[in-house]
Amino acid sequence: MSSSTFDTLIIAAIGLAGGAGLVFIQVLIQWSLRKQRPAPAQLPRDLVEPMQPRAEAPREAAAPAKEVVAPPPRVEAPPPSLAEVPPEVVAQPPPPAPSPVVTPPPITAPPPPEAPKAPPLLGLGLRKTRESFLARIRTALTGSAKLSEIYEGLEEALIGADVGVDTSLKLTEALRTKLKNESRPDAVRDALKGEIAAILEKAELPMADPGDVPLVIMLVGVNGVGKTTTIAKLAARYKETRGPVLVAAGDTFRAAAIEQLEVWCNRAGVEIIKQKQGSDPAAVAFDAVKAAVARKAGTVLIDTAGRLQTKANLMEELKKMGRVIGRGLLGAPHEVWLVLDATTGQNALSQAKIFGEAIKLTGAVLAKLDSTAKGGVIVGIAGQLGIPVRFVGLGEGIEDLREFDPHEFVEALFAGGEGEGDVASGSYAA
Ligand SMILES: Nc1nc2c(ncn2[C@@H]2O[C@H](COP(=O)(O)OP(=O)(O)OP(=O)(O)O)[C@@H](O)[C@H]2O)c(=O)[nH]1
Ligand SMILES: [Mg+2]
């Protein structure tokens, strides 16, 4: 081989090597450019899909999703291996499907307070009690001509109407003394009416007068008797008669008790003072009393958690509430009312006894009188415990509360039993 041929070959080899180098460099450049592109487009769909942002994720996080629909990768670019995929994508199992977004309920303005309606007629609420009571009395008075049997029948009728054994015996004794040998049904019935009215009147006690400061009323009782509903009814009533009302959410124990009271307060158009569930009910009551004094409110109504009268620690809690309220306003609570469920009849009497030992009761509210024939328990409460009945609950509506008046009650109880049909007199007329 001549030296010129050899030179030519060397030059050609150098040229080829240079060309190959250039091609190699170009390939390298393209490969590195490809590498800079985001990986998801290269990933199988089942790896990419779970990366979809949750509905609540911020906007930027949505960007990779767009990449999924990007044009397919160019063939000449070296595909990135899974090792090049960001480690978290490979290592992590696909996140769960986006959970439904829980949107809070829209904040709507509370409904306007309900316009106060006239309280219901007591005669309506007492219908069941009256019918049962009068039927028993009628049987007792017409069943026999013998005085001893009439009184025996009367006793049974009164006990059956949930007046209670002690008060029933007291009543028949008083009738015997008064009537002597008189056994005409009308005369016996009139005398009985008078004696019942006398027992109820004897237990009457005027409401406390707090003077210039807010009237503080605390409601206590066992579970589910109607405390909170009664608070709402009282709030609507006192707002009209005594000015601004503050309601203390003192049932910090039962779940949703505060919310329940809040709904009622909105309905009544009164302010609620509350803390979170589980907080000290005495502190809530104290705050409410202080706020009421500062704002010159007319009335403070304190709701309390339902409690069994047999639970000593819960009765202690009531005592503590009473003491702490007194520190917030001297002399308060001015009234402590035991709410009783009329449908429980005689059990109401035992509740009243034990609650009365824990805290000084100044009255009782008999709720659900509309749902029972055991309304005679009112006479037992007054006769045995000497506690005045302040109000009676006659339904579930905010207006279904009636101030208790012994005369009205007796008239309603005996209405329709004297041959004039089932028509009650005066304002009790149903
Ligand atoms: N028919 C009738 N139902 C009533 C009356 N008062 C209350 N209720 C109903 O009795 C149930 C219990 O009432 P609440 O006011 O929640 O009783 P509570 O004593 O506050 O109950 P707790 O807080 O759980 O101890 C509710 O369904 C009320 O609607 C009433 O006078 N008549
Ligand atoms: Mg309640």
Image (cartoon, rainbow, N blue to C red):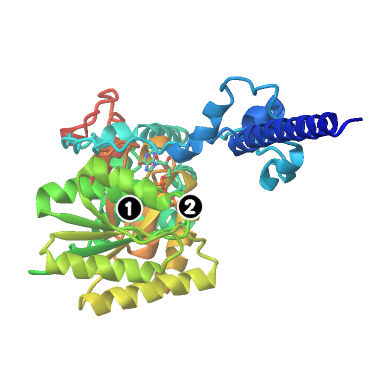
Nearest to the observer: residue 248 or residue 147: 248
Please rate how many residues cluster around mark 1, counting C-alpha atoms within 10 Å: few if below 14, some from 14 to 19, many from 20.
many
Residue type, label 1: Val
Q: Position of residue 398 (x, y in %)?
A: 27, 39
**Residue 365 numbered tag:** 1
Nearest to the observer: residue 38 or residue 160: 38
Q: Are marks 1 and 2 in contact (CB under 8 Å)?
A: no
| Mark 1 Cβ and ligand 1 under 8 Å apart | no
Residue type, label 2: Ala
Kindly state the secondary structure of the residue where label 2 is placed. loop
Q: Quadrant of residue 242?
A: bottom left
Nearest to the observer: residue 62 or residue 9: 9
- Residue 260 appearing in the image: yes
Q: Is residue 361 above or below residue 340?
A: below
Q: Position of residue 76 (x, y in %)?
A: 70, 24
- Residue 193 appearing in the image: no
Please rate how many residues cluster around mark 2, counting C-alpha atoms within 10 Å: few if below 14, some from 14 to 19, many from 20.
few
Kindly state the secondary structure of the residue where label 1 is placed. strand
> Relative to residue 301, is residue 241 drawn left or right?
left
